[in-house]
Structure formats: structure tokens, C-alpha cells
Image: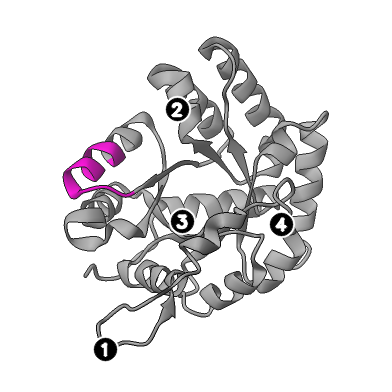
Amino acid sequence: MRNKRQNDTNFREDILRASKNNFTRVILALDLQGSPSRKLLRTGKNLVEITAPYVCAVKFGRPTVLNLETESTRSLIKTSHANDLPCIIDDKLGDIDETNSAICQAYFNMGFDGIIVNPIAGWKGGLEPVFKIAQKEGKGVIVLVYMSNPGASDDFGQLVLPTPRGRPRPQYEIFAERAEEWGADGAVVGATRPEIVRKVRAKLSDGIRIYSPGVGTQGGKVVQASRAGSDFFIIGRSITRASDPEKVAQSFARESMTLS
């Protein structure tokens, strides 16, 4: 298995710097769809520009990249970087090693600073090259541990036998241990499950931050998740579909720092 990183990646440093400078722990989630690419790019740039003072990173959903296509995606990343905001691609990458290598390298070449991966692929012949590429290029790898949707308990919460003679354990505990063992830069745990956040936090080193989606539209609460151990809050529709995205982003930013 992979040894833990000896130093923080550029990604870790950049997101912490943005969080400190903007006094926020909110990450803007962009899931752009339903319009021509040119219009989506204008929408995305506008959302980034008006919320930039209140967020510390931008997370692109895979539909955003597919709908924008490569050049427009690069352009939106440049807008984010111009506002000192690192960009995360939420691909939930989890295939064989050669496929994972090609996909993550393509994303990093576009300008992304971090990638979310699915630990179900395992290490050897799975995610090992992603971590190696990321470490070489100073990029971040965030491991999916527990999703925010109601049906996530079917898989992430199921009891599994990690070894033939082992005791049944929740799948998410094993995923959290993999994030720690592999030296991930972060772990995704839904804000909708603060009790899981608390258990995962206990398994991770301080340098591995917890990224929590599901705030707002899905019912997650910033304060509860923060008290349980979440470090960053990935917020999309509650901001992007609001009549005043800037005001809502500012409100979430203030709330995210209440207990920090």
C-alpha cells in the first residue's frame, strides 16, 4: 500500500489559504446543464465571479465538463484560478489502473487541482497510479467515504467482512481507513449524516479534511456537520439556483466559520 505523504500537497495548501483569506469553508458546486455550451460558460463564470469572495474552492460535476466540453471547461477553471480558487473534479473515479491514469491525467491537464475518487476500485491495479500522478504534480485526491443521498446506506452503510475471519464492519469504516492508509488529501462524507462524519473523523489524521456535500437542498446542516467534524461544505443548488446567489453564498460562508 501507499506510504503517507511526507508533505502537504499544493492542493491542501491552496484550499486552506483560500479558506483563510475569504473567511469561509464553503465550496461552490457547479453542475451546469440544460443549455448550449456558450450559455453554460457565461452562467458558470458569473456564478464564480459573484460568489468568489465567499467560497474557498469550486467543485465541477462531471455533467459540467461533459456539457461545457474541453475548451470551455479550461476557461471556467481559469476564471476560478484568477479568483484564487482551486478546482475539484467530482468524477468519483474508480476503474482499472490504465483507465484511471488516463482520466485523471486528462483532468489535471485541463487545470483541475484535485479529484474525487471511489475507493471501491482498490489500490493495486486500481487507484495507485492516480495517487502517484497527483503526488508528482502537487494535486489533491479526495476519497469518497459516504455519499449524501438517502440510498447511500444501501452500500456505504452495509456490513461487510473485510477478511474471511474478520468481524462484520460498515463499509464506510473501511473506506475511511483506506483514505488514511493511502494518504488522501480528503474524504467525502455527506453533511446529511453527522453521526457518520463523527466516526470517520476519529479515523483520519488531522491533515485529511472532511468534505461534506448535501447542505441545504438535501437537508444537511452546516452547524451540525461542523460540530461532528466536517471541514468543508460542498454547496450547489442552494446557491446556484437561488434568486440571489451572492447573498446566499455569503450567508453560508458566515455560518461555516461560526464554530471554526
Q: Counting residues from the N terminus, which is met first, the one under dot 3 or under dot 4? A: 3
Give how far apart the Cα atoms at labels 3 and 2 are.
23 Å
Amino acid type of the residue that numbered disc 2 sits on in the rendered structure: Val
Determine which of the numbered discs, if any, sits on residue 165 in the image.
1
Front position among marks 4 and 2: 4
Question: Mark 4 or 2 closer to N-term?
Answer: 2
Secondary structure found at label 1: loop
- 160 left or right of 249? left
Looking at the image, tell me whether mark 3 or mark 2 is earlier in sequence order.
3
Q: Which residue is mark 4?
A: 220
Identify residue type, mark 3.
Arg
- For the residue labelled by badge 4, is the local secondary structure a helix, a strand or a loop? loop
Where residue 232 sits, quadrant-wise, is bottom right
Q: Is residue 96 magenta?
A: yes
In the rendering, which numbered label is found on residue 121?
A: none
Separation (CA) of disc 1 from disc 4: 37 Å
The residue identified by callout 2 is 65
Residue range (magenta):
94-104
Q: Nearer the viewer, mark 3 or mark 2?
A: 2
